[in-house]
Image (cartoon, helix red, strand yellow):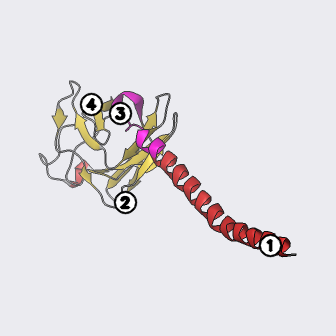
Amino acid sequence: MSGLHYKDEQTQIHSGLAAPLVGFAILILAVLGLSAYWWNIARIPSCSSGHLKLTLGQPQGAAGTSYMDAILTNSGAGSCKIAGYPTVFLADGSGTIQGLGAATSFEKTPTSFTLASNKSAHALLGFPDETSFQPGICSAASKLLKVYPPGQTTALQTSFTQYSCPGFLVTALQPGT
């Protein structure tokens, strides 16, 4: 009978250790899982100009300002990270910048996000109507729109005719088109 009593104590000891050990194992697996997740996130490169394509959305007008999305599409094979404000200029046919670059608009909060292959991000551009200004305030009409993705020194460009006037603005990049 005393042998049976000893066995019950061992079962109770093992049972008492099982819950903390299972909890500890779950904690270790969770930490390893999060580490792998963050490791993979850290390995995703920033979106480079060489892997992005620039297109323009449809123009929309409002009270003396026209708006249009600058759409950056990941044309690379893998995902990339992007965040912040693109730097935007208008330029003549030879690429010489005309007027001032777009000022940052704080309407959208900059966020970091992953852009999968063939997925897009957009920034809203605002162009004040040049007829609202005295002659000489706005630049000559552009031939190109130059967009530098955040952190990049090579511009994406497309044919575009517009004037650089005070109030020319760009919002932070947001996922989607």
Which residue is at a point 39% across and 44% down the rendered structure image? 82
Asked if residue 47 is among those painted magenta in the image, a careful observer would answer yes
Residue 30 is drawn in which quadrant?
bottom right
The Cα–Cα distance between marks 1 and 2, rounded to whole angstroms, is: 62 Å
Between 20 and 11, the one nearer to me in the picture? 11
Q: Which amino acid does label 2 sit on?
A: Thr
Is the Cβ of the residue at disc 1 closer than 8 Å to that at disc 3?
no
State which region is magenta.
39-54
Considering only order in the chain, which callout, 3 or 2, is on the residue closer to the N terminus?
Answer: 3
Q: How crowded is mark 4: few (under 14 residues within 10 Å), some or many (20 or more)?
A: few
For label 1, the SS is: helix
Is the Cβ of the residue at disc 2 closer than 8 Å to that at disc 4?
no
Q: What residue type is labelled 3?
A: Ser
Q: Can residue 99 be seen in this view?
A: yes
The Cα–Cα distance between marks 1 and 4, rounded to whole angstroms, is: 74 Å
Return the residue found at the far front: 2
Q: How crowded is mark 3: few (under 14 residues within 10 Å), some or many (20 or more)?
A: some
Q: Name the residue under label 2.
A: 109
- The disc at residue 147 is none
Q: Mark 1 points at which residue?
A: 8
Q: Position of residue 159 (x, y in %)?
A: 33, 30
Considering only order in the chain, which callout, 3 or 1, is on the residue closer to the N terminus?
Answer: 1
Asked if residue 165 is among those painted magenta in the image, a careful observer would answer no
Image vertical order of residue 71 relative to residue 13, above or below = above
Quadrant into which the N terminus falls:
bottom right
Q: Where is residue 164 in the image (x, y as percent from the top left)?
A: 22, 44
Image vertical order of residue 3 relative to residue 123, above or below = below
Considering only order in the chain, which callout, 4 or 1, is on the residue closer to the N terminus?
Answer: 1
Q: Mark 3 points at which residue?
A: 48
